[in-house]
Amino acid sequence: MDRTEAQARIASLRTVIARHDELYYRRAQPEITDFEYDRLKRELAEIESRMPELAGGESPTDQVGDDRTEGFATYRHRERMMSLDNTYSEAELREFHNRLVRLLGRDDLTYVVEPKIDGLAVSLTYEKGKFTRAVTRGNGVEGDDITANALTIRSIPKTLKHTSGAPIPAVIEIRGEIYLTLAEFKRINQQREEAGEVLYANPRNLAAGTIKQLDPREVAQRKLEIVLYGLGYCEPMTGLPGSQHDYHQLLKDWGLPGQERLWKTVGPDQTWKAVQELDQVRSSFAYATDGAVVKLDSIGLQREAGATSKAPRWAMAYKFAPERAETRLNAITIQVGRTGVLTPVAELEPVRLAGTTVARATLHNRDEIGRKDIRVGDFVYVEKAGEIIPAVIGVNTARRTPECVPYVFPSTCPACGTPVVQLEGEVAVRCPNDECPVKVRRRVTHFASKACVDIDGLGVAMVDALVEKGWVKSVADLYRLRRENLLTLGKNVAKSMDNLLAGIEASKQAELWRFVHGLGIPHVGAAAAKDLAQKFGTLEALAEAKYEDFIADKRSVIEGIGETMALAILDHFNNPKNRALVQELISLGVKPTVPVKREATSAALAGKTFVLTGTLPALSRDEATAMIEGAGGKVSGSVSKKTHYVLAGEEAGSKLEKAKSLGVPVIDEAEFRRMVGQSG
Ligand code: IVH
């Protein structure tokens, strides 16, 4: 490769890698496997090191990626969060050891081999043993403050257990990985499949997408987990263990969830054996692993070895190469999603791959097919890696025959024939027709589902039939269905059709939030729908809502409804068709109910805002919260002039100070129990 070629290749690789970084870190929707990504990065690093004079300017080879997204406050890590060097080769892993031997001048090196969890990096801060903050890695220097979302992860202890000999530091940052169990991943994808939504390719993407949800209640619906494996900043440093292995023990003693398995090894042979053993057993772990992390055990030697600008010299990730198979691409079919996105799917000659038979694989989008020049009839490589849904990685062009002609992506929607559009800045190609039968089907299925107005007897097959007949073009049409038409759907269907009609009739009086959720407004989940229902009381009022009803003085008016959601709601009802739908539903007899708030057990608490601080003698934070909410009160996280009471226990900190300075009444547990009507 000459200079000009190298220069061009560097520029092109940097652009491509930057795009995949964005897709992986910020959007949690990668289009290539980690293996392909690592290959691109390695190629770039090689050219850059061969021709350092061309390597000027910013390069992804010396950055750690950046996961910061809009909607979160950024927080500066007290100590940088590093990345890891990685390899797929045994020889390079051995070279890692040899390098350390040369660097440290000794060859009796002991390591800890840990599972490399395929999740997303996070740093938890504990101050005086109390959990205070969770921050994503971000760009390594500062990340997104995801504390509210992390509070939904039950395995994060709110206070560190003080059972071991080691003292609890004044401030400590603990590093780890947030993940979704494989079981939870399956459950969510199954639900999405039923709702006709796009599936997540792997648990990592789903976990990353979840932690960046703006509504913590939505996060709570998906049970995220965490593993902690390292220390960041710590103050004071006294009393800390001298080895990585003992760190793990200490974290466990403090009550933090740890790794499924660890190996302590001496020298490269034992280390390699442990890595292979991990590969054998990892399928039994609750989390997805994509490799092994080998860390020098001695903290003293770790310090001596130091770090480069992005990764420590004392650790190395060995990644397991994904399994891959070669098979014939028989056809490309197009799926249309609820929002109209056209997704190309590879119909494959069935082939065994990583324990299952694969007959279909995603092709992601139009551009991907073009970039990889994938043609029907080609022999293609399919990979599963950490992915659960297989992907087509590339083509074996040596086996290409002249009949394989370039694929022409449809220019019209396969379901309704409307010319497709590609919005600027998006890779997705969409069908813009709101009446497209596929979109209608998905909207109606969502509306009728258990999570929305819950119409008995209206499953996917029934919706398909109703849409196909042309009787249902919008959710309002459900309320126009006629018995005599339904009876023509088959023989002996009278009973089931009567049930269906009864279900539809009953749904007219479903709770308001169910309708709000059923409208399918982007970002509005069930929890937000409940708040909106409480606040607005009718569908018409919600449809007429103004920006100021959601955001005033740059702050949320309704707790839990932020700007992103507010804009989505306004945008939805800006569309005259969506406003008309509300009117139509009402004229068809829909009468959503708004449950009267449960009679407060204590008038003293109803409508009052409480802030909890410190440790109460007998009540846990959750118990106190439940009592307050059960009596019609609210619990807020910070003290302001609007706070009615601060319920303070022992070691109450700055919130107590603030309450005093604002003149907010401070009560203790005994006083609180009197208010709720409990004595003692
Ligand atoms: S140690 C300074 N240990 O892999 C060392 N990282 O590819 C920093 N990861 O950013 C990381 N499992 O998010 C370490 N057992 C493990 C890990 C692990 C997963 C992630 C972590 C890191 C990334 C680097």
Image (cartoon, rainbow, N blue to C red):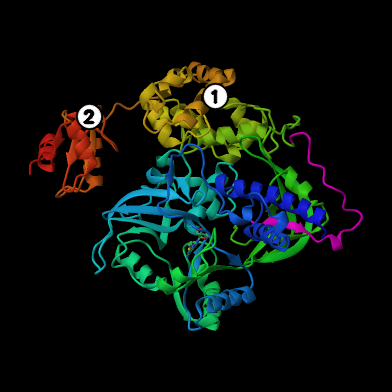
Circle on res. 608: 2
Estimate how packed mark 1 is, as few (under 14), some (14 to 19) or many (20 or more) residues with alpha carbons within 10 Å.
few
Q: Position of residue 250 (x, y in %)?
A: 33, 67
Question: What is the CA distance from the residue labelled 1 to the residue labelled 2?
Answer: 33 Å
- In this rendering, the answer to whether 592 lies above or below 237 is above
Give the residue furthest to the right: 402
Q: Name the residue tied to disc 1.
A: 571
Give the residue furthest to the left: 680
Q: What type of secondary structure mainly makes up the magenta span?
A: loop
1 or 2: tag closer to the N-terminus: 1
**Does the magenta segment cover residue 401?**
yes
| Quadrant (top left/top right/bottom left/bottom right) for the N terminus | bottom right
Foreground residue among 245 and 672:
245
Q: Position of residue 110 (x, y in %)?
A: 46, 79
Foreground residue among 248 and 12:
12
Whether tag 1 and tag 2 are in contact, CB under 8 A, the answer is no
| Quadrant (top left/top right/bottom left/bottom right) for the C terminus | top left
Place residue 493 in its image quadrant.
top right
Helix, strand or loop for disc 2: loop
Q: Residue at x 82, y 57 (%)?
A: 378
Q: Position of residue 191 (x, y in %)?
A: 52, 46
Q: Residue at x 39, y 27 (%)?
A: 555
- Range of magenta residues: 389-413
Amino acid on which disc 1 is placed: Asp
Q: Residue at x 45, y 25 (%)?
A: 508
Relative side of 492 to 417, left or right: left
Relative side of 489 to 241, left or right: right
**Does the magenta segment cover residue 159?**
no
Place residue 596 in its image quadrant.
top left
